[in-house]
């Protein structure tokens, strides 16, 4: 079959498998939205071995930076002199600058993948009740975004790689 059809079918079949995992046996540990963001990033970055490594390493680095930011946010008093919104904005500004400057380290140079990890982590923290607190952030549990979002990014990136490999097998030469 042609390349687009093969890729469409492989992505569709594996998206079904990923959905089964996300709503079935891996529910609460594997988030389909974080996985498909990483899956797309893998293709956006070129669908190569380098893209696989960069998506995982920088994506997880973004998760770590968001986790640190979240811990810092939990330390801001609601009645801070400058107000919580302003202090939160300063905290996020500094963290994002540090995350982007880390691109000076070659292994952390894929800023878009770092941002996807950072954003996915805050999506989880801000949209899931009772997650943005120190008890969750410092726990060694599958409620901690450091673990679950990193797992989703890694698994999603590999789903991207597998869909590309499957499409290649189905493509007519």
Image (cartoon, helix red, strand yellow):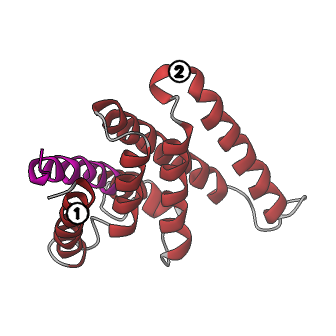
Secondary structure at badge 2 equals: loop
- Residue at image point 74% right, 57% down: 88
In the rendered image, the quadrant that contains the C terminus is top left
- x, y percent for residue 12: 23, 69
Q: Please, what secondary structure does the residue beneath circle 1 have?
A: helix
Tell me how far mark 2 sits from mark 1, CA to CA. 38 Å
Q: Which residue is rendered at x = 19% and y = 59% of the image?
A: 6
Badge number at residue 15: none
- Earlier sequence position, callout 2 versus callout 1: 1
Above or below residue 92? Residue 106 is above
Across and down, in percent, residue 60 comes to 41, 43
Q: Quadrant of residue 4?
A: bottom left
| Label disc, if present, on residue 105 of the rendered structure | 2
* Coordinates of residue 110 in the picture (x, y in percent): 51, 34
Is 28 located above or below residue 147 in the figure?
A: below
Q: Answer whether residue 116 is magenta in the image.
A: no
Residue 112 falls in image quadrant: top right
Instruction: Assign the N terminus to one quadrant of the image.
Output: bottom left
* Quadrant assignment, res 33: bottom left
Q: Residue furthest right?
A: 81
What residue is shown with label 1?
Answer: 5
Q: Residue at x 56, y 70 (%)?
A: 126
Residue drawn at 42 percent across, 49 percent down: 41
* Left or right placement of residue 97 versus residue 17 in this view: right
Region rendered in magenta: 152-173
């Amino acid at each position: 079959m042609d390349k687009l059809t093969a890729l469409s079918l492989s992505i569709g079949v594996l998206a079904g498998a990923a959905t089964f995992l996300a709503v079935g046996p891996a529910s609460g540990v594997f988030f389909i939205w974080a996985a498909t963001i990483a899956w797309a990033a893998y293709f956006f970055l070129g669908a190569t071995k380098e893209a696989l490594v960069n998506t995982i390493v920088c994506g997880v680095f973004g998760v770590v930076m968001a986790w640190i930011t979240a811990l810092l946010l939990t330390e801001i008093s609601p009645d801070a002199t400058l107000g919580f919104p302003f202090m939160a904005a300063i905290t996020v500004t500094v963290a994002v600058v540090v995350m982007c400057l880390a691109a000076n380290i070659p292994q952390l140079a894929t800023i878009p993948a770092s941002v996807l990890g950072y954003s996915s982590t805050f999506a989880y923290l801000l949209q899931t009740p009772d997650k943005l607190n120190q008890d969750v952030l410092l726990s060694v549990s599958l409620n901690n975004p450091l673990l679950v979002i990193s797992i989703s990014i890694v698994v999603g990136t590999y789903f991207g790689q597998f869909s590309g490999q499957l499409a290649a097998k189905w493509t007519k030469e």
